[in-house]
Image (cartoon, rainbow, N blue to C red):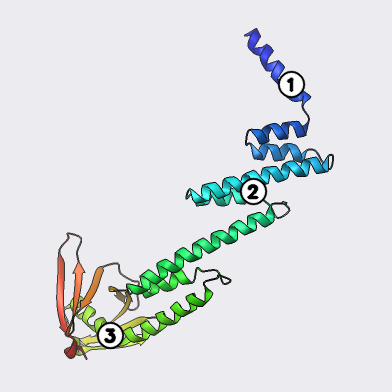
Amino acid sequence: MKKVIYYILIILLTISCKDNYDLAEEYYSLKKYDLARMELSKMGNSDYKKKEALIRKIDSSILESAIKVYYEKYIDSSMNLLNKIDSNSSMINEKKDFLRKIDSINDNSNYKLALNLFSKGYLNKSFALLTKLEPSSHLDSVKNELLEKIEKKKIENKSKELLISKAAISSIFGKPTSIMKVDYFEPGVYKVQYKSAGKIYKYKIRFDGTFIIWGAEPGGWRNDKLYYTETKDAYYIYEQFSDGSTRKDKFNKRLLR
């Protein structure tokens, strides 16, 4: 027991004999950067150049670690490390360069995914991803081209979706499409209404690719698994139930007009 106390005293004495800079260097070598900064902060303005040189080494090591963990897909950890490099750091320009590189990587990824979703008809999801691109992105011109294509496609789909909206409500409630009236409202919402037994029923429809999202009007949106397919002459409305079964209804395009 006496030996343990003796060694502890020796360690404490050794530490007490070290100045703040020596301790900061020791913490730096152990990659305990926060503790190293704390010791450097106690130095005041003494040995300014030596202090700043070690701060740069600390920030350089932090940036190196941030880059490494970013490419290892630990995005949050990378951002937390980058936040330790403040605006007064001599490494701030290197930090900004890396952040711009991250923005570029994210922009490329989001654009490719947006393009893929557009090709599959998921216009709203494609649009949402494009809005994430940085305003100064190098992809700004192709982004705008794709946005124009999305708007054009929405206009092209409008006449088709007006008919499918009636078919969807007819499929859900078993009412004839001949009694239904449908109108288009921005942004991409269709309103369907019909009169039955003296009462007016109102619903809303929007589309996500071939998926149909609907709800009562007024009211929230439902999460039913409702979607459509089409052939040259007909639309097919499908609803998949929780037990795995599926209901399918066929609607002749000519009779929906």
For the residue marked with disc 1, what is the amino acid? Answer: Thr
Q: Any mark on residue 84, and which? A: 2
Where's residue 58, x and y in %?
Answer: 68, 42
Q: Quick one: label 1, few (<14), some, or many (20+) residues within 10 Å?
A: few
- At horizontal 56% and vertical 50% (from top left) the residue drawn is 67
Question: x%, y% of residue 64?
Answer: 60, 46
Quarter the N terminus occupies: top right
Q: Do callouts 1 and 2 mark residues in contact (Cβ within 8 Å)?
A: no
| Residue 212 in the image: above or below residue 153 | above
User: Within the image, what quadrant is residue 218 found in?
Assistant: bottom left
Q: Amino acid at mark 3?
A: Lys
Q: Which amino acid does the dot numbered 2 rest on?
A: Lys
Q: Residue 160's mark?
A: 3
Mark 3 and mark 1 residues within 8 Å of each other at the beta carbon: no
Q: Nearer the viewer, residue 46 or 119?
A: 119
Q: Is residue 186 visible?
A: no
Q: Which residue is mark 1?
A: 14
Q: CA distance from mark 3 to mark 1?
A: 82 Å
Other residues around mark 3 within 10 Å, as few (<14) / some (14–19) / many (≥20): few
* Residue 179 placement (x, y as % from top left): 20, 89
The residue nearer to you, when weighing 87 against 224, is: 87
- CA neighbours of label 2 inside 10 A, class few (<14), some (14 to 19), many (20+): some
Q: Residue at x 75, y 20 (%)?
A: 13
